[in-house]
Image (cartoon, rainbow, N blue to C red):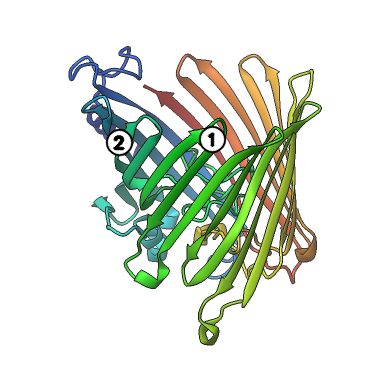
Amino acid sequence: MKPDLIVILLAALLAAAGWPDCVGAGTEKSPILGDDFRIRGYVQGNPLHIRGLPEPFDDDTFTEYRLHKRLNLRWDATQDFSFHWQMRTRLFAGDLVKDFPAYVQDITRDDGLVDLSWTLIEEDDWIVHYIPDRLYTEWNRGDWNVRAGRQRVNWGVNMITNPNDIFNIYSIYDFDYPERPGSDAVRIQRFLGFGTRFEVAASPDRDLENSVAAALFAFDARGYDVQLIGGYYRERLAAGGGWAGNLNGAGLKGETMFFADFKKENRRRDTNFITAASIDYMFANGLFAIAEVLFNQGGGRDAFSWMAAETLSPDNPSFSRYQAALQLTYPIHPLVDGTLTTIGYPDEDAVFISPALTWSVIADLDAQILGQFFAAGNDSALDGAGNLVTASLKYHF
């Protein structure tokens, strides 16, 4: 990838984001379209160095370059009605695009009800791809909130693993997607008082049997936020709940789900019970720690590869039956944070380690170095999962 081409594309992406009109306008109001229109986002560039992948990649080392522009738009049409459009435009260049067509297919795939994926440019060793992950209308009045369109239905409680997120589960291995995925859905919320609400959501699929529809009831129980969930998840009954509270300054959270197939003749795993519990605590020296344990009764996967971009699912949210995670974040300097994430898979004889350093260079400009490393035995499903090191520079506007 030629440096001059990267510069040209960066300038084009910044222009598409409204640069320089957005800069200095804050991220709240557009100086062009008025107070009812808000725009914000960021531009991020990062190279990746990847190795340790299984066949057909063998033991080769791959280098990839990414340029990522995110643009978030909001229009308040009336006091009660608003429109949200949030999008990702990404450039991928390097060995993986050049040598593996399946990788490009995975990047450009859109599993939503409406296919909104656009490949803007595709060459032998680089592509530019656009996709919105939020595109919805919102009506908000009094105790009612209604959203329709591509959105995030956030039912998760834990900070690492979220089996309660049956509409759009998030993967901790997805290192460059802090916004987390959305789904094409309709969501209705009714707030009933302090800590109490009822909501229903439905996300139809192109194949109707793979749709998701569920209801959630949340309430306060002696200082704990409790939620109960029940519904339909891709030909399976889904039922469970979550909780969050505080004990002597430590946060206690947990999620539990039960899944059972409706069709006996087409059962995948008959039933599956999943529970994940966590504790988080902020120490006096600024160290923030999260510890989580997970049990996935019928879960785990036969293999995992970073290259496959394999999406975890709410009814199988881990790569092993048992999982223990620890995440530590410490302010090394007022402008530098260090994070270390480790996950152990006892039944797979494997461990995942991800260190990261984040530096606030100047206002709105952040730099980060991050690694993801798997160590596993030869018979483990995580053998050949791949390792990567990446550095990024992100400018917020």
Going 72% across and 35% down the picture, which residue do you hit? 222
* Residue type, numbered disc 2: Trp
- Figure check: 17 above or below 56: above
Given residues 225 and 203, the one toward you in this image is: 225
Given residues 110 and 104, the one toward you in this image is: 110
Going 28% across and 53% down the picture, which residue do you hit? 117
Q: Residue furthest left?
A: 32
> Residue 391 bears which disc, if any?
1
Image quarter of residue 108:
bottom left
> Residue 62 bears which disc, if any?
none
Going 43% across and 51% down the picture, which residue do you hit? 200
Image coordinates for residue 82, horizontal then vertical, percent: 27, 32
How far apart are the alpha carbons under marks 2 and 1? 40 Å
> Residue 139 bears which disc, if any?
2
Image coordinates for residue 104, horizontal then vertical, percent: 37, 59
Image coordinates for residue 51, horizontal then vertical, percent: 59, 55
Q: Quadrant of the C terminus?
A: top left
* Residue type, numbered disc 1: Ala
Circle 2 — which element? strand
> Quick one: label 2 or label 1, which is nearer the N terminus?
2
Q: Quadrant of the N terminus?
A: top left
- The answer, for residue 98, to whether it is visible in the render is yes
Given residues 13 and 8, the one toward you in this image is: 13
Mark 1 closeness class: few <14, some 14–19, many ≥20 residues within 10 Å: some
- The answer, for residue 89, to whether it is visible in the render is no
Given residues 339 and 54, the one toward you in this image is: 339
Depth-wise, is mark 2 or mark 1 nearer the camera? Answer: 2
